[in-house]
Image (tube, helix red, strand yellow):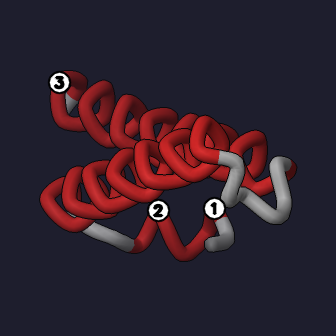
Amino acid sequence: MKIEKMREMTATELQNEELKLKKELFNLRFQKETGQLENPVKIRDLKKEIARVKTVLREKTLKRAEG
């Protein structure tokens, strides 16, 4: 998902997105340990996506605190 699209989302939507991504990351890690993961790069990409969501959430929190 593009960061511009994330910035248009509400804080609740972003929190739901973060939760969804964390569940997906858990499933990928589980697949890795059981030897079923086909593309290990997905884990790295998913971690970066989670970081983007957290960054936008933090931006929104700071904006709300300012004004």
Residue at 84% across / 60% down in the picture?
39
Vertical position of residue 19 compared to residue 67: above or below: below
Which mark is nearer the camera, 3 or 2? 2
Residue at 55% across / 40% down in the picture?
29
Q: Earlier in the sequence, mark 3 or mark 1?
A: 1
Residue ID for mark 2 = 7
Local crowd size for mark 2, using a 10 Å CA cut-off: few (<14), some (14–19), many (≥20): some
Residue ID for mark 3 = 65
Q: Is residue 1 left or right of residue 18?
A: right
Mark 2 in CB contact with mark 1 (< 8 angstroms): yes
Q: CA distance from mark 3 to mark 1?
A: 21 Å
Q: Amino acid at mark 2?
A: Arg
Residue in front for this viewpoint, 36 or 16: 36
Q: Amino acid at mark 1?
A: Ile
Is residue 52 among what the camera can see?
no
Quarter of the figure with the C terminus? top left
Q: Is residue 43 left or right of residue 14?
A: right
Judged from the image, the secondary structure of the residue bearing numbered disc 1 is: helix
- Across and down, in percent, residue 11 comes to 21, 54
Q: CA distance from mark 2 to mark 1?
A: 6 Å
Residue in front for this viewpoint, 51 or 55: 51
Quarter of the figure with the N terminus? bottom right
- Across and down, in percent, residue 21 comes to 42, 55
